[in-house]
Image (spheres, rainbow, N blue to C red):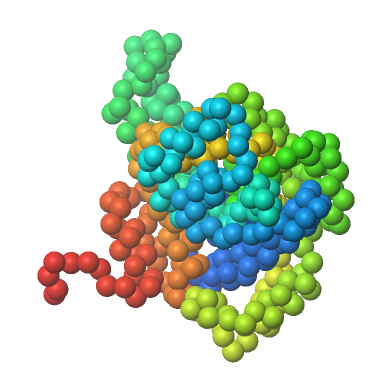
């Protein structure tokens, strides 16, 4: 898990590889907590500063901001905007208003939507949820490990087939044997996933509704900000139409230290087990040892395509649902990687800064309540039970 929005992405990636190999260092829980708390603070502040400046450059008036904590708030805003769109968009909005719950409105969300005084949408920004980070990281890792399992299965099958050319569809029992061999190899030798395979670039996300701003003008605006550059650019067309950018932002660490010190309430950090008495000093020392850049995922699109992505043909949640269904076909490896990564992230958000073991092993087999029990334990919450013993 290499999160390009975090200053200490290299260290988090190294810890992730060790945890997947069941190698715990005593300092890991506190270090993960600092990364999840301090790096997230910097990432969020940097995102809000960038999107605010971007809105000012695109729209001459004062943008209005509305916080979003659940997807229904976002979808309601889009469907109640002054933007009208095509006849198809009007139809989609009408169908949404008849039955909002059919459109995955219950997903939690951390972000803002920005609009004009006349209620035209300008932009949206969000911070990807922990569960989605774990799912994405596990999918990337699973694709890599599953490829190795497939190669092992093919080698086994060639050895048992009468004709070496008889590969075809590999039987389930041979696939299971290959997976077990791969898991035993990981248990014995550990695992080191490649950085390029495990890089997650969209933890910080912005969607800009162009509203007459050309592609070249938008890029000119972005690159006028000091320390900002476009790292990647990709066109999407067909089912989903947009221009996709990866933006690198230079972080003013002194400014972040000032912002952190000006916070009136640091309870959220002390609740995660960080040293309350010397929190400001701890924050300053920690972020000074990381990178001074981070990356933001930016999508430039139209209002019509925004509606399509939320309640239409390219609805985000529908794509996630399909990904989860596909992921189930990878076997135990996928589930275990997701559990380990989700537990790692949960440690960073919990009051617990010491643990005795990594409770999920990549070579084991677990039901979902194994993970939920372990995460509840991090918060000192009792497990649900009909009887007590």
Q: Is residue 53 left or right of residue 372?
A: right
Q: What residue lies at 37% left-to-right and 18% top-to-bottom?
A: 169
Residue 50 location in percent, x, y? Answer: 74, 57
Q: Nearer the viewer, residue 251 or 235?
A: 235
Q: Residue at x 69, y 45 (%)?
A: 208
Q: Position of residue 373 (x, y in %)?
A: 30, 63
Q: Nearer the viewer, residue 182 or 129?
A: 129
> Residue at image x 63%, y 30%?
241
Can residue 8 be seen here? The reply is: no
Give the x, y percent position of residue 88. Answer: 54, 27
- The quadrant the C terminus occupies is bottom left
Q: Is residue 299 found left or right of 355 in the rendered image? A: right
Compared to residue 178, the image places residue 82 above or below, namely below
Corner quadrant of residue 242: top right
- The picture places residue 383, in percent across and down from the top left corner, at 25, 68
Residue 264 picture quarter:
bottom right
- Front residue of 250/90: it is 90
């Amino acid at each position: 898990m290499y999160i390009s929005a975090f200053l200490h992405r290299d260290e988090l990636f190294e810890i992730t590889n060790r945890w997947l190999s069941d190698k715990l260092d005593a300092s890991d829980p506190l270090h993960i907590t600092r990364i999840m708390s301090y790096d997230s603070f910097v990432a969020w502040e940097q995102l809000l500063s960038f999107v605010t400046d971007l809105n000012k450059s695109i729209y001459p008036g004062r943008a209005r901001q509305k916080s979003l904590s659940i997807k229904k708030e976002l979808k309601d805003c889009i469907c109640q905007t002054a933007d009208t769109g095509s006849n198809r968009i009007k139809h989609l909005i009408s169908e949404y208003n008849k039955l909002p719950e059919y459109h995955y409105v219950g997903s939690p969300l951390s972000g803002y939507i920005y609009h004009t005084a006349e209620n035209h949408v300008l932009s949206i920004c969000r911070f990807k949820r922990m569960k989605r980070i774990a799912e994405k990281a596990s999918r990337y890792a699973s694709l890599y490990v599953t490829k190795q399992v497939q190669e092992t299965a093919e080698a086994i099958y060639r050895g048992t087939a009468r004709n070496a050319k008889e590969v075809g569809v590999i039987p389930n029992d041979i696939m299971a044997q290959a997976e077990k061999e791969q898991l035993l190899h990981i248990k014995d030798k550990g695992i080191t996933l490649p950085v390029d395979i495990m890089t997650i670039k969209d933890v910080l996300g912005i969607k800009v509704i162009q509203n007459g701003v050309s592609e070249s003008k938008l890029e000119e605006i972005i690159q006028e900000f000091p320390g900002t550059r476009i790292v990647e650019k990709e066109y999407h067309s067909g089912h989903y139409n947009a221009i996709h950018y990866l933006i690198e932002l230079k972080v003013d660490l002194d400014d972040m230290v000032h912002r952190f010190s000006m916070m009136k309430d640091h309870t959220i950090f002390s609740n995660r087990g960080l040293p309350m008495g010397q929190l400001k000093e701890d924050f300053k020392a920690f972020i000074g040892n990381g990178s001074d850049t981070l990356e933001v995922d930016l999508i430039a699109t139209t209002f019509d395509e925004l509606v399509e992505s939320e309640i239409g043909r390219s609805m985000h949640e529908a794509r996630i649902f399909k990904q989860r269904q596909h992921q189930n076909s990878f076997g135990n490896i996928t589930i275990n990687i997701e559990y380990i990564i989700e537990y790692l992230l949960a440690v960073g958000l919990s009051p617990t800064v010491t643990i005795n073991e990594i409770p999920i092993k990549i070579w084991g087999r677990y039901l979902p309540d194994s993970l939920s029990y372990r995460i509840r334990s991090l918060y000192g919450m009792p497990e649900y039970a009909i009887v007590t013993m």
